Amino acid sequence: DVKVTQSSRYLVKRTGEKVFLECVQDMDHENMFWYRQDPGLGLRLIYFSYDVKMKEKGDIPEGYSVSREKKERFSLILESASTNQTSMYLCASSLVWASGLFYNEQFFGPGTRLTVL
Amino acid sequence: GEDVEQSLFLSVREGDSSVINCTYTDSSSTYLYWYKQEPGAGLQLLTYIFSNMDMKQDQRLTVLLNKKDKHLSLRIADTQTGDSAIYFCAESKSSNTGKLIFGQGTTLQVKP
């Protein structure tokens, strides 16, 4: 079974702190994603990565950065946390092609609920 | 443009059928997905349909795709309390990035 793990289930930080959210997948997937989930807004893509050291901005990258030094690990960094970044953060990984077929199932971690005070 | 829309809430009685609807705007989408999120958990793929199909059935789940109207629906037969969750539809194109566009999610409440 694919497993995507996130470093914390709950996190409380203060405004201005630097915050690291870690995500690890164990299935050798090329693609990894960071989303935030807010009620009524669904999932919004922050950043994604399709290879080691490669990253692309999603729909809401402002205030965030990412790091992918190893294939299995994708980190989300809040350089200076603000209260409007209080949210649920979900990490996902996917294998787009398998056995020559377009597949593209994303596998999600359990989420990190971040509160910024 | 890329936009996926869902209604936010649906309430049904146990044993009834549930129908969750979704509209999308990008006619070039190749696959459309339904994901389920149970309380306190991440999303899990429920089912998907390729854009050249009109219908897909998988046990209690039926997916209907109307490409002309860009409308996708998920029908859950004999809805159980364990089906209470948030359901997200999502679309993707055939690309190497694997990017998905998600709707806002529909919270399904199943009353006993």
Image (cartoon, rainbow, N blue to C red):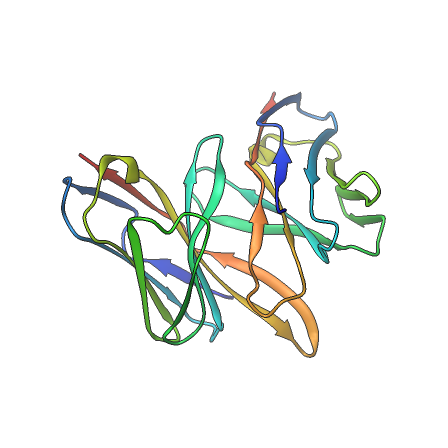
The part of the image, by quadrant, that contains residue A115 is: top left
In the picture shown, does residue B109 fall above or below A74?
A: above
Work out whether residue B1 or residue A75 is closer to the camera in this orientation and state it: B1
Question: For the point 58% across and 35% down, which residue is it?
Answer: B82
* Residue A68 percent location from the top left of the image: 34, 70
Q: How many labels were placed on the picture?
A: 0
Report the side of B99 relative to B46 (left or right): left
* Residue A88 percent location from the top left of the image: 36, 42
Question: For the point 73% across and 31% down, which residue is it?
Answer: B19
Residue that sits furthest to the bottom in the current view: A99
The part of the image, by quadrant, that contains residue B11 is: top right
Work out whether residue B94 or residue B110 is closer to the camera in this orientation and state it: B94
Question: For the point 74% across and 38% down, which residue is it?
Answer: B73
In the picture shown, does residue B93 fall above or below B11?
A: below
* Residue B101 percent location from the top left of the image: 58, 49
* Residue B75 percent location from the top left of the image: 75, 36
